[in-house]
Every structure is written in C-alpha cells, then in structure tokens.
Image (cartoon, grey):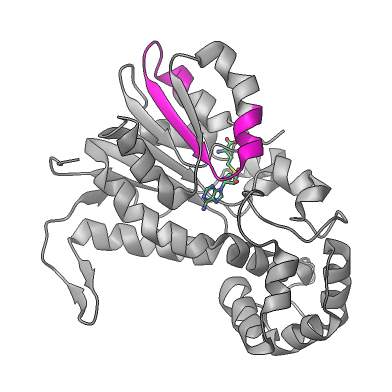
Amino acid sequence: MHVPVLFDEVIQALQPRSGGRYLDCTLGGGGHTAGILSASAPDGRVLATDADGEAIARARERLCGAYADRLTLRQAWLDEAPTLARALGFAPLNGVLVDLGLSSDQLEAAERGFSFMRDGPLDMRFDRTRGEPAWMLIERMDVQGLTEMLRDYGEVRNARRVAEAIWQARPILTTGRLRDVVAGVARTRSNRIHPATQVFQALRIAVNDELRRLSAALPELIALLSPGGRIAVITFHSLEDRIVKEIFRRESRGEVVQPGFGMGKDRPARVRLVNKAPIVPSEAEVARNPRARSAKLRVAERLASVQV
Ligand SMILES: C[S@@+](CC[C@H](N)C(=O)[O-])C[C@H]1O[C@@H](n2cnc3c(N)ncnc32)[C@H](O)[C@@H]1O
C-alpha cells in the first residue's frame, strides 16, 4: 500500500475547506485524496485522476463507500486533466495536487515492469491500455536515440556505451535482462545507487512522455485556479523539479514563452510562490518511509481574478 509523501505539508499547503473544489491529478493509492476529502468535510469535492486504470479501480473500492457523493474518479493523463476538470464542472478550482512518479503499488507489481528488483515484462506504462511498452520502444530506437534518452532522462554517465550494449542485446523483454545488460557496462557516481536505477528512470520517463506532459499541464492547471487557490507539486528527481521551478518562476513574473522570440513579458504575474525553497521531508519521515527521500514540494498561489 502506497504511503503518501509529505502528507501534512500537502494538506497545510492546500488548506482544503468545506465547499471547495480540488483536483488530484495523481491519485495513486488515494492517500492524499482521502486527506483532502477529510479536511474539506462535509461538502468539499474532489476530482481525482490517474493514467493508471488499476489505481482508479482500487481507489473506487477503497474510497467510494465513504465519499461517493464528493469524489469523482477518472482515468486521465496529467495533461488531459485540465480539460476534464472543465468539462466536469470543477473549474475554478481551490486546489490542485500533482504528486509525480510511481506509487509503491506500481513499483511492487512485477508484471508492471517498473522495478529492476523484480523480474517481469519490460512494460513501464502507467496506462496499460494505450501506447508502447518499454521493450517495444527499445526495439524501435537506434543507438543515437537510446543514447539521448539515457542522457536526457536518466543523466546516465556513459550513456553511449550503455545504449550500445542495450541495442546489441535486443530484444530485451524483461526487467531482469535489462538489469543484467546494464550491470555489465554502466557506472554510477555513487556506490549506493544500482547502475540500472537511472536507466529504468530514463525509460519510464520516455515510455510515459512524462516531462512533456508536466510542462504542458502546469500552465493549464494554474489557469484553472480561483484567486487564492493553490497548486502543490511533489517531484522525485531534478529533471522534474527543474521544470516545476522554472514554470512557477515564469508564472510569478508574468513571463511567457513566445515561440521564436524567447521570453516576453506581456501579461501580469498569475501566481505568487508560497515557499521560495522547496519543502522536503523531515528526517523522521524519511526514516519511516525511505521512498520520501528525494521528494520536493513546491507550492504556488493564484493571484488575480480569473476567467475559466
Ligand atoms: C506517487 S504516486 C501518487 C500517490 C498518491 N498521491 C497517494 O497518496 O497515494 C503517482 C501516481 O501518479 C500517476 N502518474 C504519474 N505521472 C502521471 C502522468 N503524467 N499522468 C497521469 N498520471 C500520472 C502514476 O500512475 C501514480 O499512480
């Protein structure tokens, strides 16, 4: 069962209240959603989405008994959630949560193919009904494409060598096989990290198109907030955190990216940063839940009145 990360900090950031409308774009095991529902009793409403239909089905069993009239569950990618929230009448929103990455349920299910610690098919799709599994993506890529993917999404040190080894070993159909191929060639900066960690991260990001979805979704989610409404984003690695930091910074200065012209400054700031530095878990939380180790929470608050 997934243990929600930075639970108290998220509830404190979103300040859920009765009558409010909230969007949790990464339902996972439903811990944060349950917290928002409980804190916004008796009549706060939550729309909770996730690309993973299995997470939705589990949450339906777990949460709908207690919260059926206040909780709406839908399977959707992060960048589909804003349109869905509008269509379902949830806008403007009082709060949005994005808690990126994997849930423990996904990591521990060998058949999902997310973990090199468990042998299973090399799948890694959050939504197993759409798109290409990781093994198929590898089949389709050339060495150059694999190298760029490992470098850009995994910050893998000797990306070219690892890419060549992967390419030569194709077809790689299982997590165990990929782990063994990588272990033969990869180096990491730290002895504490298995060399396959960054390779698996890179593949997962590519399979689910995670960074593009994050960049596309954040401005749309900010646009859906009511004045004073807050967006809280938890990231688990520097690539994600850099995107959140940069978009929040731009939105707090009124900067927009104009294709072909770089940065422009032609609208008022839409948010203020609630915390300058990201919020990180306490030592006690990391001791209780080592998966919280690399989490960073950034929070922004919507400023001006909005048309949604
Ligand atoms: C860390 S878990 C969320 C845990 C949740 N907050 C809880 O309390 O249990 C991340 C969840 O977000 C989903 N997810 C990650 N990236 C996504 C994306 N780009 N679009 C939709 N869902 C995504 C994953 O399927 C996973 O279930």
Q: Quadrant of the N terminus?
A: top right
Q: In terms of depth relative to the viewer, which is nearer, 169 or 157? A: 169
Which percent across, then down, holds residue 294? 60, 55
Q: Quadrant of ligand 1?
A: top right
Per the rendered image, the range of residues in magenta is 37-58
Residue drawn where x is 62% and y is 63% of the image: 207
Residue drawn where x is 32% and y is 57% of the image: 248
Which percent across, then down, holds residue 224? 27, 42
Residue drawn where x is 68% and y is 77% of the image: 140
Asked whether the viewer can see residue 46, the reply is yes
Which percent across, then down, holds residue 3? 65, 35
Q: Is residue 213 left or right of residue 179?
A: left
Q: Is residue 300 left or right of residue 73?
A: left
Asked where in the image residue 40 lies, by quadrant, the reply is top left
- Classify 196 as above or below 58: below
- Classify 3 as above or below 67: below
Q: In terms of depth relative to the viewer, which is nearer, 212 or 187? A: 212
Q: Is residue 159 left or right of residue 214?
A: right
- Classify 77 as above or below 1: below
